[in-house]
Image (spheres, rainbow, N blue to C red):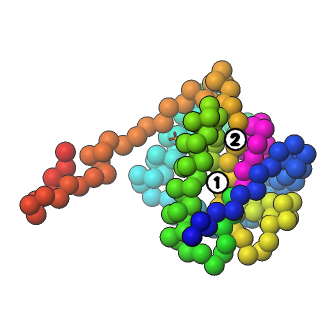
Amino acid sequence: MQPWRVHVVTGEAKTRLSCAIAEIDNDPSLSNHLEDAYEYYPREWTSPYVDRRRQVGWELYGLLGIEKGDKQRMHAQHGRNYRFFDAPVGLIFTIDRVLKEGSLLDYGMFLQAVMVAARGRKLHTCPQAAFLKYHRVISQSLAIPADQMLVCGMSLGYADETSIENTLVTDREPVSAFSTFHHNNKETTP
Ligand SMILES: Cc1cc2nc3c(=O)[nH]c(=O)nc-3n(C[C@H](O)[C@H](O)[C@H](O)COP(=O)(O)O)c2cc1C
C-alpha cells in the first residue's frame, strides 16, 4: 500500500518551519495545551516503559551536564529538535487518515529503511516524535492537506562525532527477557 508521504525541507523552507514551531514552543501560553497528532505514547505511563524512557532521558541529560530541575536548559535542549539538530535536511512524514494501524506498522519499516539506507551512505538520522505536538503549524507551513496525519519528523545529515550527546549508547534488554520459545508444548526461556 506504500502509505508514506514525505516532505523534505532544506534551506529557507526548513528555517521557516523551525521558526514557526519555535515561536509556539517558546511561549508556554501557546504550547501548554497542544495535543499530539496521535497517541504515540500511552496516557498513563507504567513500568517498565516509563523506567526505560527515563533512563535514556537522564543519561542524555547527564552527558550534557543538565541537572534535574534545570527547566531552562532542558527546554533549550528539547528545542533543538525543532531545528532538526542543525542537520541540513529535515524530513516530515505523513500518512493518509483513512489508513489504519497496520499501515503504521508498514510505516515503521519504511522509517527504518530510510535510516539504514542513510547509514549506507555515511549519513546519520534522528527520528523525531517531538514534532507531533506541532502538527497544526507544520501542516500550515508545508501546506499539508487535512486528510494527511503527521507521523513523525526526522533529521538527516552528518552527526557531529565530537558532540558528547552522540556518545550515548542505550541499553538493550537481552533476547531472553522478551522471548518465549515453544517446543514440544513446553515453554522455555534461554
Ligand atoms: C519513532 C521515534 C521517535 C523518536 N523521537 C525522538 C525525538 O523527538 N527527539 C529525539 O531527540 N530523539 C527521538 N528519538 C530517538 C531516540 O531518542 C533514540 O532512538 C534514543 O536516543 C535511543 O537510541 P537508540 O534508538 O539507538 O536506542 C526517536 C526515536 C524513534 C524510533
Task: Kindly tell me whether residue 76 is visible in this rendering.
Answer: no
- Residue under label 2: 156
Residue 177's tag is none
Using a 10 Å C-alpha cutoff, classify the residue at mark 1 as few (fewer than 14 neighbours), some (14 to 19) or many (20 or more). Answer: some
Residue in view at x 40 percent, y 40 percent: 172
Residue ID at (54%, 57%): 108
Q: Residue furthest bottom?
A: 98
Circle 2: element type? strand
Mark 1 is on which residue type? Answer: Ala
Magenta-colored stretch includes residue 168: no
Front residue (pair 99, 136): 99
Q: Quadrant of residue 43?
A: bottom right
- Residue 34 visible from this viewpoint: yes
For the residue pair 125 and 171, the one nearer the viewer reads as 125
Residues in magenta, as a range: 81-92
Q: Position of residue 2 (x, y in %)?
A: 59, 65
What residue did someone put label 1 on?
129
Left or right: 151, with 140 as reference point: left
Q: Which x, y percent locates residue 178?
A: 31, 51
Q: Position of residue 38 (x, y in %)?
A: 63, 67
Question: Could you tell which of marks 2 and 1 lies nearer the N-terminus?
Answer: 1
Nearest to the observer: residue 134 or residue 66: 134
